[in-house]
Every structure is written in structure tokens, then in C-alpha cells.
Image: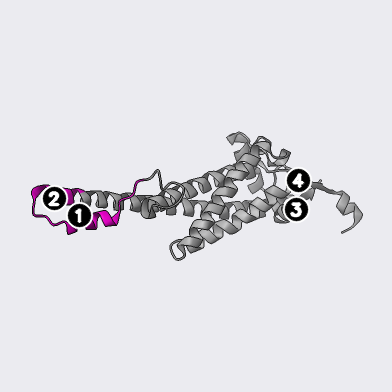
Amino acid sequence: MTTDRLDDQVPVWDRFVRVAHWALVAAFAVAYLTEDDALTVHVWAGYAVGTIVVLRIVWGFVGPQHARFSDFLYRPGVVLGYLGALLRWRGRRYIGHSPAGGAMVVLLLAALLGTVGSGLWLYALEDNRGPLAGIVTSASPSTASVTVARGADEENEEDDHDDERGHAREHDGDAEALEEIHEVLANLTLVLVFLHIGGVLLASFVHRENLPRAMVTGAKRR
């Protein structure tokens, strides 16, 4: 690269934004691909996703200019106008996030928070583990087995047994519903990821610059 081309570059993405971006890509991919097949790996990947998202949100208020939400949050009309211009192979070039890129950042962060939150809730409900284990009450299989073993000679024991089975069924229903919500949010996040990739590639062609590379080097054309 010549000196002129080096002089033509301006730093945009700080090191934290770049590392967090690619670490989030890796952590989400691991979490999505493992699911129930490797629960421990899935859980720790989910922890990594949640930690990165929280740190990125904090960085959005205290980080440098182009990392801050105030730099890339625009009114819906501006976002739609930019998208329309981009699809017509036009559109203003932004040094930081474009209006559409900024909106996608917010959507992805929200979707990831929802996915991680529902996963933590489900983990506590099913396995009584994780940071929410002390908050979410889960039915214990051992309780039901003890109730059955006590026998059902007296009427009050029969009632207790029925109550235990009712709670177990309610617990199973809650877990199934929460698992479905968790999967829907994970799939929604994946859809947003593909939309994000498509938008980045389109903007790269329209503005004639390599946006993925900029997220590696941290610099863009002046």
C-alpha cells in the first residue's frame, strides 16, 4: 500500500468494537450450532454472547465517537430513506454506521438479549442452574417420586399426589413454551444476521469500499 493510500485512511472502529464484533460472531455461531447436543458448550457460548452484548451496550454510551449510539441512531424516516436510496444503487456514504446499519445494530443487540435471557430462564427452569436458578422455581423430579413412594392409602396423600402431578405438568408446559420462545428468538437473530451481511455487501458495492475489512483494520476511506 502506498503512502498516499495510507494517508487516505481514517480510523473509525476502535479495538473494542472490532474484537467484540468478531467475538460475538463466533460465540453466537457456537451457541446456535450446539444447542442440546453439547449443553455445556451451548451454555458457555450463551454466557459469552450475553457478556459481549452487555459490554457493547455500555460501550455505546462511553466509547469513542463512532461506537456511541448517539452517532448512528436515526429517525425511522431517515433509515427508510437511506434503504430506498441504497436499493437504487445510490445513497449517502457515512464514515461510521449508516442509518440502516445503526438500526441493525440495535435490532441485533435486542434480539441477542432476548435470546440469552430466555435461555437463562429455561436453564434455570429445567436444570435449576445458572444465574437465575435462585429466582426461577423448578419442579424437582425427586419430590414427585417421594410422593408416589409414600403410598396412596389415605385420601390426603392422594390429593398431594394429584397436586404434584399437576405442578409437574404445569412445569413441563412452561418449559416447552419457553424453549419455543428461545428457539424463535435464536432463529430471528439468525435472520437478522443474514440481513446484516446482505446489507453490508450491498453497501460495499454501492460505496466501493470493503466494509468487512474495515471491521478488521478499523480504518475506512476518508
Q: Amino acid at mark 1?
A: Thr
Query: N-terminal of the two: label 4 or label 3?
Result: 4
| Whole-number angstrom distance, CA of label 4 to CA of label 3 | 14 Å
> Any mark on residue 12, and which?
4
Magenta segment main secondary structure: helix
Task: Mark 2 vs mark 4: give the one in front.
Answer: 2
Is residue 191 placed above or below 75 in the rendered structure? Answer: below
Q: Secondary structure at mark 2?
A: helix
**Disc 2 packing (10 Å; few <14; some 14–19; many ≥20):** some
| Whole-number angstrom distance, CA of label 2 to CA of label 4 | 69 Å
Give x and y (percent) for residue 21: 64, 52
Is there a contact, CB below 8 Å, between mark 1 and mark 2?
A: yes
In front of the other: 111 or 76: 111
Query: N-terminal of the two: label 1 or label 2?
Result: 1
**Disc 3 packing (10 Å; few <14; some 14–19; many ≥20):** some
| Whole-number angstrom distance, CA of label 3 to CA of label 2 | 73 Å
Task: Mark 4 vs mark 3: give the one in front.
Answer: 4
